Structures are given as C-alpha cells and as structure tokens.
Image (cartoon, rainbow, N blue to C red):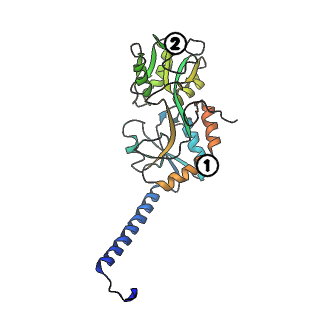
Amino acid sequence: MAPENRPRHPFRRLAAGLCLMLAAAGAAGAQQTSDLVSQTAFRVCADPANRPMSAEDGSGFENRIADLFAAELGLPVEYTWFPMATGFIRRTLAANECDVVIGYAQGDELVLNTNHYYTSAYVLISRADGPLSGVTGLGDPALQGKRLGVVAGSAPATHMVRHRLMARARGYELFVDRRYRDPSGDMLADLEAGGIDGAILWGPIGGPLVKADHPGLSVTPLLAEAGQPRMFYRITMGVRLGEKAWTRRLNLLIRRNQARIDAILSEAGVPILDDMGTAVKVVAR
C-alpha cells in the first residue's frame, strides 16, 4: 500500500500534535528568556559600597568595566544596588531587576557564568620593609608565631588551621553591609597600627586598596599553597540561568575587549594571574 493511502493512526496524530506543542512552548520559553534582558539599558546588579570593586559613585573597577561594555552595546548603564550578602542574587538578578553581575566566581549554581575574564588569588599584605614581604605560601616558616588577619570562613582560614596559624590570628567578618562596616579597611588599619603582622585578603580587594591608600605595604599573591580549598578563582560575569543568548553576547564582548579589561584591572591594582593560578600575568601596556 502506498504511504498516502494508508489509514492515519490517531496516536500518530496525537504524537505529531504533541511535538508541535513542545516546539511552540520551547520557542515561547526562549522568547520569554530573551525578553527579560533590557534592550534599552545595560542593567547591572551591584553592591553600592563594595570598594574597590563597585561603588555607587562609579569609582570601582567593576563600574569601569560596566561602562566599557555599555559603550560597546551603545546603551546607558543602569544599576540596581543591593549589599553583596545573603539574598543578593534573589533580590536583584533573579527578580529581573537587572541583567548582569559584573564580577562573579566561576562555578556558582545561582547564576549562569560567562567565560572568565580574569583570574586572581588571595594575597598576603605586609609592611614593605618587613620580614613577611615576599612570602608566597601559608606554609612558609616565616609566618610561624605571627599575628595574621583573615576573613572568617574564607579559603585561607582553612589552610591556616592546617599550618597551625590560627592561635594568634585575628578574624574579620565576611558577610556585612559595607555601607556601614568595612572589615577589609579595618584589617589594613590594624596592620599599619601594629595590631597584626600580616593581612590576608582576596586580591581584587586587597591589591587596589593598598595601591590607592597604603604605599608602605606590599601585596604578594599566595601562589604556593597546595591542596584544597584552592586559593585562586576565575572571575566571570553572572547572568540568569537559561539566558544562553545573552551569555554568548557577553562572551563576545569579553573576547573582543580582553586587553582593555586587563588594563582596567591592572591600573586598579588587581593581581591578575594566568588561567591556572600559578603565575602573575604580564599585562601589555
């Protein structure tokens, strides 16, 4: 029997209709996801007082990267400000109040990550003329008996326990509203006052703070630390889950503007590493 003369099976018609419904639903879902991203502004989710990364006055290096991308897209920048603490993603990106977080560690399940645009590490900050200047690992014997400042609950704290450095350590809070409290600034002030011998901070925070306001201190990336948790992270931009078209567009902007991004980070004082976190990256001038 020729195909066109065979009786049509009702289940075949049902299956075909279901396929059409699924295809239409997929197209509608893709359209809905696409529609969430503003076409009239580059909408950024940011902490208003997370210097030196982001600030409401636009002085942070993430503000400068946002300005760069907005110019490339031909759009104005619009910010949704919220403290970088519990609920940040839920109250900003997930609520469709904004479309991108400029700096977000690779691998977090709350967002879809773009390609990373830089890699950095925790650093040891000490007096430039002191005995800890140049120490690249927490296992260095020079640290034994020293008073170190560390953010409680951060990756370096785990290594400090392993190396028996916590007995004299001074802890600083991780999750605070930085509009009212400044643990990183407090740590550096304590270092300069002699309350601690060294400060361990996330490089993109510590490096720029020292470069801007603390000329008597030195910043050394902690590259010699073995084991977990790792001390370096690749930094991406975070977008809403499922927004793959927007992610690809941002990836293209990152690729085209990598040299300009590197220049912004380097000028700010951010320690930039190679992708594996094993060496300082030389930024072309």
- Residues at marks 1 and 2, CA–CA distance in whole angstroms: 48 Å
Specify which label sits upstream in the sequence, 1 or 2.
1
The image position of residue 55, as x and y in percent, is 51, 35
Using the image, determine if residue 121 lies above or below residue 169: below
- Amino acid on which the number 2 mark rests in the picture: Ala
| Direction right: furthest residue | 285
In this view, the residue in front, 143 or 50, is 143
- Amino acid on which the number 1 mark rests in the picture: Ala
Residue at image point 62% right, 38% down:
262
Return the residue at label 2.
Answer: 142
In this view, the residue in front, 185 or 240, is 240
- Quarter of the image with the N terminus in it: bottom left
The image position of residue 175, as x and y in percent, is 39, 30
| 82 on left or right of 71 | left
Callout 2 crowding tier (Cα within 10 Å): few <14, some 14–19, many ≥20: few
The image position of residue 259, as x and y in percent, is 65, 41
Callout 1 crowding tier (Cα within 10 Å): few <14, some 14–19, many ≥20: few
Return the residue at label 1.
Answer: 71
